[in-house]
Image (spheres, rainbow, N blue to C red):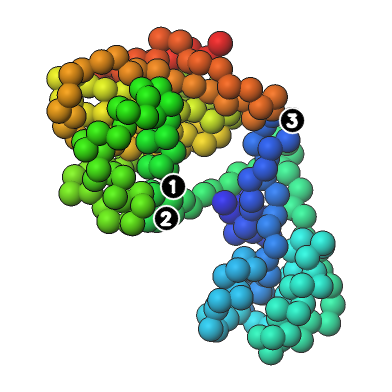
Amino acid sequence: MRLADNCEYIGLLLGVKVEEGKLAYAPIPQVGFAKAQQVGWKFMAEPELYKARSLPDGISLQKGILLIPDLDVPRLIRLLWRKGISFKEKNEVFPQPSNSGQIEIEGEYVVDRVIQRAVSKIALNYLAKIAGSGFVLSENFDSIRKFMRYGTPPDYKFFRVSQDPILREDSKIMRQTTGHLIVSEWSGSQNEIKVHFSLFNILTHEVVLTPNYSGMWRDIRTGHHFDITNRRISKLHNAIFVRPVRKILGRLV
């Protein structure tokens, strides 16, 4: 996540945290290098700077360096020293919200193989909880199980990430909860078994656990919500799909 407001610190890297049941954003440990020809900074997260073989182009060490946040300043100074950069004056940056009490942010989400395997494992575990371990031990799930264990992807399109909401009253912009959601689905006409999973109800991960189940159809359609405030799990009611719209109809109660 990055600060997108039109201010001096545009591009500041942000992390997500939960405060009083709501998502909040705060700066992560990072270093800002002053741009050589422009006003502003080029920010590098601590892990990125640690691995980097060189500094970003278009910066000026003479114009200034920012260390963020304050608690990690000694560690960041040591990191800069290992990169051959001497930091003489400490600077702290904590951007203030705009007059409306809000700040504009933008996000970049990378779904790599590790994330796909982890989400697939969550999906299969959930199906085992709903349908029983004997059900998921079927050879129909061997392909996705092999991917989870060894990283060999299935020979079908098994993973999709979208902003499609899971709950009926939600839209791509407005969400009624910041809790985690998970729903299982089995289309009897296609024999395709899926699980939809969303952390903090932001992005929806769709995992096709098997494209063509060979056994007799049964109703495994169900969903659950994890409240991140009181750490309680509740069942979703009327969690069904409407074709052809890829949207789960559900009411959070």
Q: The C terminus is located in which quarter?
A: top right
Q: Are marks 2 and 1 in contact (CB under 8 Å)?
A: yes
Amino acid tagged 2: Val
Residue identified by numbered label 2:
114
Please state the horizontal and vertical placement of residue 175, each as a whole percent of the image: 53, 25
Amino acid tagged 3: Glu
In the current view of this chain or complex, which residue is farthest to the bottom? 84
Give the mark nearest the N terminus, 2 or 3.
3
Give the Cα distance between marks 3 and 1: 28 Å
Residue identified by numbered label 3:
20
| Residue 213 relative to residue 50: left or right | left
Between 214 and 119, which is closer to the camera in this rendering?
214
Q: Nearer the viewer, mark 2 or mark 3?
A: 2
Give the mark nearest the N terminus, 3 or 1.
3
236 shown above or below 179? above
Q: Residue at x 57, y 26 (%)?
A: 226
Q: Residues within 10 Å of mark 1 (few under 14, many from 20)?
A: few
Residue 141's quadrant in the figure?
Answer: top left
Q: Secondary structure at mark 3?
A: loop
Q: Residue at x 70, y 78 (%)?
A: 79
In the current view of this chain or complex, which residue is farthest to the front? 134
Residue identified by numbered label 1:
118
Please state the horizontal and vertical placement of residue 45, each as a whole percent of the image: 62, 66
Q: Secondary structure at mark 1?
A: helix
